[in-house]
Image (cartoon, rainbow, N blue to C red):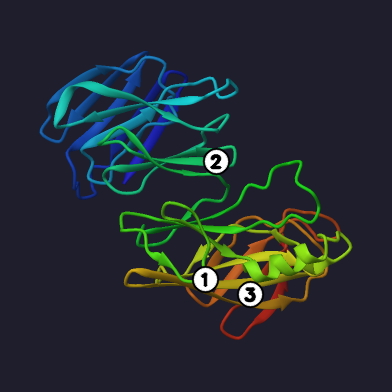
Amino acid sequence: MIKACSALAWVRLVLISWLPVIGQVAEFELKGDQLRIRTQSGKAHQVQAIRANPESFRLSPDRTKLVWHETFAGYAANTTLPVRLWALSQPGSAREFRVPTMSRYINRVEWIDNSLVLFSGDGYGVLVDVEAGALRAAIPGPDITFSPDRRLILYWSDIGRSAPDFASHEVFLQIMNVQPPEAKSVPQARPAAYKLYPPDEELERCAALNWNTDRPECRHSALTPFAWFSDSRRAVFLEWHDGSVWAVILTIDLDGSALSVHHEKFRLPVAEQISFERISWLKQDEELEAKTKGMPPITEGRRIIVNLKRQTVTFDEPK
């Protein structure tokens, strides 16, 4: 377990002494532009960390590496994110490299494994192989959600603030650390990235209607991020479609070298397009809760509890 304390230019992370320590970094702190690191054996290291963003420091799962990014001009053209990596195998200095990004700010830094790191913010993310110092994949969308086995990523497409009313949000899948599979009836957007939902045939029918904005069946709007099932092959989300809120379950089938997806959905008795906070499991793989954000006429903090097994919905007012 790691406890974080920060104040101004002072950041300190300490491994709690009563928990077993797997890795080798016991403690690190940023003071001014100096990063001080102490290992479990008591050996001390010090490296420069000029212009470091003090909120971005993350320790790798094996606790042998530290990654962070510098503050950067996210509103500039051709933005690159300055990334720094310190490794116990080369403790004398931090490695420096830059990664292209379209984010204007970064508010999430997360290790995927001991070499891949996600930097994301402003509806855009980049997966960086910090061992190679290279961009592995760009994720042009918000609500980036990893499967429990850390092999799959779901995210919503970013349709932009000026998108027409008929444009739908689309669900994309990014596959990690495996040979990109052949897609069976699943459009491939980029290497190892696939569009899963809504089905293309549905969007094509709407296109044949000249994208009539008076037809509510032609628009799918994301209401929540994703909640993964424990099998790392199914995920659920809520959407607004055809005048109702729907619970949609995606089943991703990675059969050897081929990819296919199936979806099932059921309508919730909610006839207002409202905003939700993140959905979470009340009972893993069976029952979800989603809290409203207070968009009228729904009370702020009201819980909608969805039982996926029985396909039932209950409402719980905030206390």
Give the label on residue 21, or none: none
Q: Residues within 10 Å of mark 1 (few under 14, many from 20)?
A: few
State how far apart marks 3 and 2 are (Cα): 29 Å
Q: Position of residue 162 (x, y in %)?
A: 76, 41
Q: Residue at x 24, y 35 (%)?
A: 65
The one of 49 and 122 positioned closer to us in this rendering: 122
Q: Earlier in the sequence, mark 1 or mark 2?
A: 2
Q: Position of residue 181 (x, y in %)?
A: 37, 64
Q: Is residue 103 left or right of residue 35?
A: right
- Whether label 3 touches label 1, CB < 8 Å: no
User: For numbered disc 3, what is the local secondary structure?
Assistant: strand
Splitting the image into 4 quarters, where does residue 288 fall? bottom right
Compared with residue 84, is residue 59 higher up or lower down, i.e. above or below? below
State how far apart marks 3 and 1 are (Cα): 30 Å
**Residue assigned mark 3:** 306
**Residue assigned mark 2:** 124
Splitting the image into 4 quarters, where does residue 175 fall? bottom left
Q: Position of residue 124 (x, y in %)?
A: 54, 40
Position of the C terminus, as image quadrant, is bottom right
Give the label on residue 185, or none: 1
| Kind of residue at badge 2 | Tyr
| Kind of residue at badge 3 | Val
Compared with residue 32, is residue 280 higher up or lower down, i.e. above or below? below
The one of 270 and 317 positioned closer to us in this rendering: 270
Q: Earlier in the sequence, mark 3 or mark 1?
A: 1
User: For numbered disc 1, what is the local secondary structure?
Assistant: loop
Q: Which of pointers 3 and 2 indicates the residue nearer the eye?
A: 2
